[in-house]
Amino acid sequence: MRDIQKLKEIALTLRKDIIKMLTESGSGHPGGSLSAVEILTALYFSEMRIDPNNPRWEDRDRFVLCKGHAAPVLYAALAERGFFDKKHLSTLRKLGSILQGHPNMNDTPGVDMSTGSLGQGLSVANGMALAGKLDNKDYRVYALLGDGEIEEGQVWEAAMTAAHYKLDNLTAFLDHNGLQIDGPVSEVMNVEPVDEKFKAFGWHVIVIDGHDFEQIFKAIDEAKATKGKPTIIIANTIKGKGVSFMENVVGWHGTAPNKEQCEKALAELGGDTNA
């Protein structure tokens, strides 16, 4: 399905679910969850070959949320896609819940990899992609990194490895929103120029507006057509996208909204079907 209007409606639903579940939990990470909504909507509701009734299907496409603290956007997508009942969203981060603060592949249907230790996800995605090559499988592997996360050295070891093994069945997205928990990425540990770095490491590089579905799909198609090297899609995004008082505000990296803020955010989202 590449019905852009329908996908925009799904994205709006995911944003509302993210706000509601974080308010209920009283903790979590709204900023980087909201910035990645369009990317996950495109993957889970159009692009990826998956089966909610068979989460461990051997031939499914894989997704690794490298920046595991953005779990709310993954949970919202999985619930809306039918991997588990949406009633679980209100149990985020609660004792005994299948939805913990970081994804757990052993407890949550649809989660392909437990993540949270920043910098490790791309290495795991490499392993999945290489296994697909060795087993002559045609599944694809998608990974979502954060721009603060790529300050980690292991990311660059993984980047070198992916190019060395010509993992053209791997597509990484970079949620390039410019903020991390301690402030602007450029001030904490400047990672620019990201595009030139990945090119130097042997990757095919595409730069897009990460909130534009048409650009996202064009980039995905280009990645699938690229042979002999992995692709990274550098998605320029807005942290806290869709909620005016959260957008580009570093304090919303890891702060949950209170009830009043939740109501204000939902009122904004309720009147905006073009998020």
Image: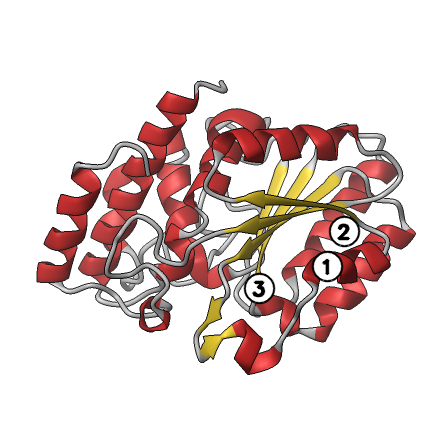
**In contact (CB < 8 Å): disc 1 and disc 3:** no
In the rendered image, the vertical position of residue 203 relative to residue 23, given as above or below? above
Return the disc, 3 or 2, that comes first in the chain's sequence. Answer: 2
The reply, left or right, for residue 151 in relation to residue 86 is right
Q: Amino acid at mark 2?
A: Gly
State the residue position of label 2: 127
Q: Is residue 221 above or below residue 204?
A: above
Q: Are marks 1 and 2 in contact (CB under 8 Å)?
A: yes
Q: Quadrant of residue 150?
A: bottom right
Dot placed on the residue nearer the N-terminal end, 1 or 3? 1
Residue pointed to by mark 1: 123
Q: Amino acid at mark 1?
A: Ser
Residue 265 drawn at (x, y percent): 18, 52
CB contact under 8 Å: marks 3 and 2: no
Q: Say which amino acid is labelled 3.
A: Asp
Q: Nearer the viewer, residue 195 or 69?
A: 195
In percent of width and height, residue 47 lies at: 57, 27
